[in-house]
Amino acid sequence: MRYIIACYLLTSTLIYSQDLPVSASFSVVEDSLISKAFSLKLAANKERYAAYYFTIQLYYGNYEGAQKALANLSQVAPDLVPKLSFETPNYKVQVGPFKKRFEATERLQKLKQFYRGAFLLEPKVRF
């Protein structure tokens, strides 16, 4: 008898549960603080990603040598944009940024033919 009642209740529940149409739409109410926090997080991640890159240092020495390195670079690799910076008491000539290590290493091997002292600078990012 219990089996019959259980089957009846189960069957009636399954049959009547399908009578109402199912609506697939819903709405999400979002607090403005959540939106603001999410946009701040996206901005922070963008800054972190933008700061993480590799550079190649071609020369480190006096000003005349740095000028020669820059002039030579415009002939050797005109597509690279050099950066001349001063760090007491020497000048540095660097090229980059390269987002991927593979790209930077490949370019470094080509530049080592002309700049024997060239090396890859690892990104130093503090978070």
Image (tube, helix red, strand yellow):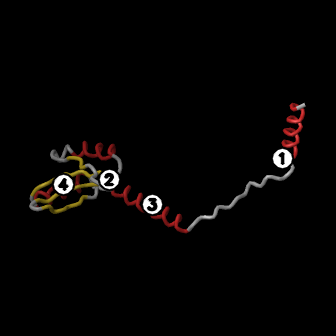
Front: mark 2 or 3: 3
Q: Nearer the viewer, residue 67 or 26?
A: 26
Counting residues from the start of the chain, the first of labels 1 and 2 encountered is: 1
The residue type indicated by label 4 comes to Asn
Please state which of residues 39 and 58 is positioned toward the viewer in this rendering.
39
> Could you tell me how far apart the alpha carbons at marks 2 and 3 are, in whole angstroms?
20 Å
In three-dimensional space, the C-alpha distance between marks 3 and 4, rounded to whole angstroms, equals: 43 Å
Closer to the camera in the image, 97 or 48: 48
User: Which badge, 4 or 1, is on the more N-terminal residue?
Assistant: 1
Q: Residues within 10 Å of mark 2 (few under 14, many from 20)?
A: some
Amino acid type at circle 3 is Lys
Q: How many marks?
A: 4
| Label 4 secondary element | helix
Nearest-to-viewer mark from 3 and 1: 1
The residue singled out by tag 2 in the image is 53
Q: Amino acid at mark 2?
A: Tyr
| Residue identified by numbered label 1 | 17
| Mark in front: 3 vs 4 | 3
